[in-house]
Image (spheres, coloured by chain):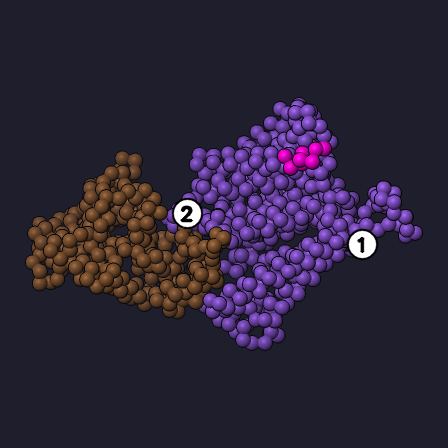
Chain colours: A purple, B brown
């Protein structure tokens, strides 16, 4: 009741009271905002500590690519955990599917079928095989959980062993390389990126899309006579979003191609070498574009479709969902199918980036993915978690690792720090929730 | 439901002669029961939770279902709501045999249930709970949250005008507000048959009065209501007929006007029909 009153008060009164009522009037997710602040603190700390090497176009661009594959899987993990399950097999599924995709393009199409390397369709066939295989593996695990009644922890623990073990059936665990030329672009790198013009275009489209969504939602609420945010709050949110999006594009475009690559490009295209060197902006990397696309689709599924509503309802109260007529088993199975597909996409990104499939592909990824979801506010009690939160969680995790790498912290120490941060973050979150309740 | 159906569906007036067994409204006034549950059996691992029970419900009628803990009231009603289908027995809606295998089947026949636990998803807002499993969607199949919120505001305006928390998850609501959400879910979809399992158990006096008024209102709209309660005063105030269960069996169904509270109490505790019970036994109930 008091909250409703506050909202009305904030709508009427001028916006200069306290920070808290200011945030309330904007109806922002304070958790998400808190995470952004935490991320900013991490970045600034590493920046100062490393003598100004962290917040650079080059490092942030690399960070975005490194976070992408974990973030892709974390979006699906949110739905799995929200519906009170867990998937420990994501790293192994990623590896098995990634390996299979590598086999398709490096062995089966060129050698077994004798069609040769680097056909124009190779990358698409490999990707399609991967996505279908990922969906099938996810579906199998989902059916065992939902219809077979085996706890997801057990099913996917078994899956972790089975899928990774199966890799060795292909070529006794030999590395499969090289991959198709077009497929490699999925992994990023200077050529696997949008370049300056397309990056600006994507930024502009994203801004337009977000502003339209804000406007459409306001108009819809008006039509139904529901309370709306005060106009100044809408403008502030819109402006902040535009600044952040265009800022990110600017950073991506500020990272130039390495000089050697630029030189080769100049020679190939007969461009005279300018005195200061040829600056070719890299732009947004393809893995990041894939991650953003995945995030959009999964967010839509989670918040705007019946499927997502059921996932959250099952997490909140499985019995209520069942009594409401929700097909609980089908919904649970679908969450695992989605997870499998996302593992396949992440597998494509990782193999493409390495330009090879190796047996330790995706090792410990399940821990990073689960950590990203949990740091992003997904609760193991079920029913709570957001996709943007999980993506931010993935960026936080990767920022820690990348920052420590920059400071030459050895790998075991990195693990120790990440482990402690994970527990501390969840503990702090639990404390905040208890206080709020 | 139109007026004619409501009057024809009414149980007998005080002037009408009491039926021989006291278990049926006069046949001339009520041609067709809304629901008949015949010879229902439900067992859990050899225990007969419901043992050959037969009850019926007419339009515009409230049938109170009473009995002690473990008498089988909730189990009987879960067979009708589809939450736990019966092992054997027949369910007839409007005289036609039907199969109710899950909650979706029950809802398709216009059977809505307000569970004792309320069966709310705590992390979802009021509109999401009201429409859970029956979401309104836009042309492209997205959730139409605005339309659902609007419909919820409308039905809440009727049930609980002071209800304002449409944006928060139902976890943060008071017991009475949560109950309103559960009731809104049951009445929004034009239920013909309403099952209320202990609807006032978690409520304060003011909210209880509200539920009682609602029962009267729904009754006048021609809805048939099964009311489960262990509060015999509640049942006496609201029900037209009272079905008493003991250890999974039906002791009997009586017309409220033909019995006293003590006689019903004797049925609940001793399993004796009103005509079997002696004055001495009735007196002992109070000692």
Q: Which residues are magenta?
A: A118-125
Say whether residue B245 is visible. Answer: no
Picture residue at 40% right of the left edge, 57% below the top: B130
Q: Are marks 1 and 2 on the same chain?
A: yes
Locate residue B85 relative to residue A145 in the image: left or right: left
Residue appearing at x 63%, y 28% in the figure: A167
Mark 1, chain letter? A
| Residue A189, above or below B209 | above
The image shows residue B208 at horizontal and vertical percentages of 30, 64
Q: Which mark is residue A52?
A: 1
- Residue B25 occupies quadrant: bottom left
Q: Quadrant of the C terminus of chain B?
A: bottom left
Q: Can residue A132 be seen in the rendering of this structure?
A: yes
Magenta span includes B210: no
Give the residue number, with chain letter if any, for mark 2.
Answer: A326
**Gap between marks 1 and 2, in whole Å?**
53 Å
Q: Quadrant of the N terminus of chain B?
A: bottom left
Left or right: A56 with respect to B70?
Answer: right
Q: Residue furthest bottom?
A: A13
* Res. A436 mark: none
- Residue name at image x 54 percent, y 75 percent: A12
Q: Secondary structure at mark 1?
A: loop
Q: Is residue B105 above or below residue B160?
A: above
Q: Chain of mark 2?
A: A
Q: Which residue is more in the foreground, B105 or A81?
A: B105
Measuring 80% from the left and 54% from the top, which residue is drawn there? Answer: A52
- Residue B286 rendering spot, x and y as whole percentages: 16, 57
């Amino acid at each position: 009741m008091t909250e409703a009153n506050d909202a009305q008060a904030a709508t009427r009164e001028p916006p200069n009271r306290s920070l808290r009522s200011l945030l309330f009037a904007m109806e922002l997710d304070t958790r998400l905002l808190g995470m952004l602040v935490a991320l900013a603190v991490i970045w600034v700390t590493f920046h100062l500590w490393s003598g100004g090497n962290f917040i650079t176009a080059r490092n942030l661009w690399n960070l975005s690519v490194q976070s992408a594959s974990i973030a892709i899987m974390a979006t699906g993990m949110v739905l799995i955990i929200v519906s009170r399950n867990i998937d420990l097999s994501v790293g192994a599924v990623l590896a098995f599917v990634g390996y299979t995709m590598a086999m398709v393009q490096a062995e089966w199409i060129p050698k077994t079928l004798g069609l040769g390397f680097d056909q124009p369709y190779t990358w698409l066939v490999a990707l399609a095989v991967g996505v279908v295989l990922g969906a099938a593996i996810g579906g199998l695990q989902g059916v065992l959980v939902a219809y077979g009644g085996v706890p997801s922890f057990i099913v996917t623990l078994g899956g972790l062993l089975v899928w990774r073990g199966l890799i060795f059936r292909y070529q006794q665990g030999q590395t499969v390389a090289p991959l198709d030329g077009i497929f490699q672009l999925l992994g990023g790198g200077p050529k696997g990126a949008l370049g300056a013009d397309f990056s600006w275009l994507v930024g502009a489209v994203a801004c337009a899309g977000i502003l339209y969504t804000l406007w459409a939602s306001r108009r819809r609420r008006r039509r139904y006579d529901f309370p709306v945010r005060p106009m100044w709050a809408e403008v502030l949110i819109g402006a902040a979003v535009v600044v952040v999006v265009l800022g990110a594009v600017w950073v991506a475009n500020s990272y130039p191609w390495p000089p050697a690559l630029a030189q080769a490009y100049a020679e190939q295209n007969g461009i005279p070498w300018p005195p200061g060197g040829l600056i070719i902006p890299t732009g947004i990397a393809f893995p990041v574009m894939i991650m953003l696309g995945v995030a959009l689709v999964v967010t839509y599924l989670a918040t705007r479709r019946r499927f997502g509503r059921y996932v959250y309802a099952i997490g909140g109260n499985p019995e209520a969902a069942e009594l409401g007529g929700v097909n609980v088993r089908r919904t649970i199975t679908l969450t695992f199918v989605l997870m499998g597909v996302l593992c396949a996409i992440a597998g494509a990104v990782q193999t493409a980036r390495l330009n090879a499939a190796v047996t330790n592909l995706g090792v410990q990824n399940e821990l990073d993915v689960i950590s990203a979801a949990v740091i992003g506010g997904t609760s193991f009690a079920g029913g709570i978690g957001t996709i943007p939160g999980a993506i931010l969680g993935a960026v936080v995790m990767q920022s820690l690792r990348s920052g420590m790498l920059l400071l030459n912290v050895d790998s075991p120490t990195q693990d120790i720090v990440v482990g402690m941060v994970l527990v501390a973050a969840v503990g702090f979150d639990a404390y905040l929730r208890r206080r709020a309740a | 439901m139109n007026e004619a159906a409501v009057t024809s569906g009414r149980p007998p007036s005080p002037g009408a002669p009491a039926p021989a067994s006291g278990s049926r409204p006069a046949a001339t006034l009520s041609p067709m029961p809304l629901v008949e549950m015949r010879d229902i059996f439900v067992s859990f691992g050899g225990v007969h939770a419901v043992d050959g029970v037969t009850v019926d419900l007419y339009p515009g009628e409230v049938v109170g279902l009473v009995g002690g803990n473990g008498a089988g009231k909730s189990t009987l009603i879960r067979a009708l709501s589809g939450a736990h289908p019966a092992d054997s027995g027949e369910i007839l809606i409007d005289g036609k045999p039907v199969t109710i295998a899950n909650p979706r089947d029950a809802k398709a026949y216009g059977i809505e249930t307000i569970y004792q636990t309320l069966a709310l998803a705590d992390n979802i807002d009021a509109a999401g709970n009201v429409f859970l499993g029956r979401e309104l969607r836009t042309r492209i199949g997205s959730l139409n949250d605005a339309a659902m919120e609007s419909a919820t505001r409308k039905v809440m305006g009727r049930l609980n005008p002071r209800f304002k928390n449409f944006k928060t998850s139902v976890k943060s609501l008071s017991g009475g507000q949560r109950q309103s959400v559960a009731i809104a879910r049951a009445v929004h979809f034009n239920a013909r048959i309403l099952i209320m399992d202990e609807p006032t158990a978690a409520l304060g006096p003011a909210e209880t009065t509200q539920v009682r008024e609602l029962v009267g209102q729904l009754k006048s709209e021609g809805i048939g209501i099964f009311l489960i309660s262990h509060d015999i005063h509640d049942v006496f105030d609201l029900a037209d007929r009272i079905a008493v269960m003991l250890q999974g069996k039906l002791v009997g169904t009586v017309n409220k006007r033909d019995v006293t509270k003590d006689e019903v109490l004797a049925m609940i505790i001793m399993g004796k029909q009103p005509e079997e019970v002696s004055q001495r036994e009735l007196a002992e109930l109070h000692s």
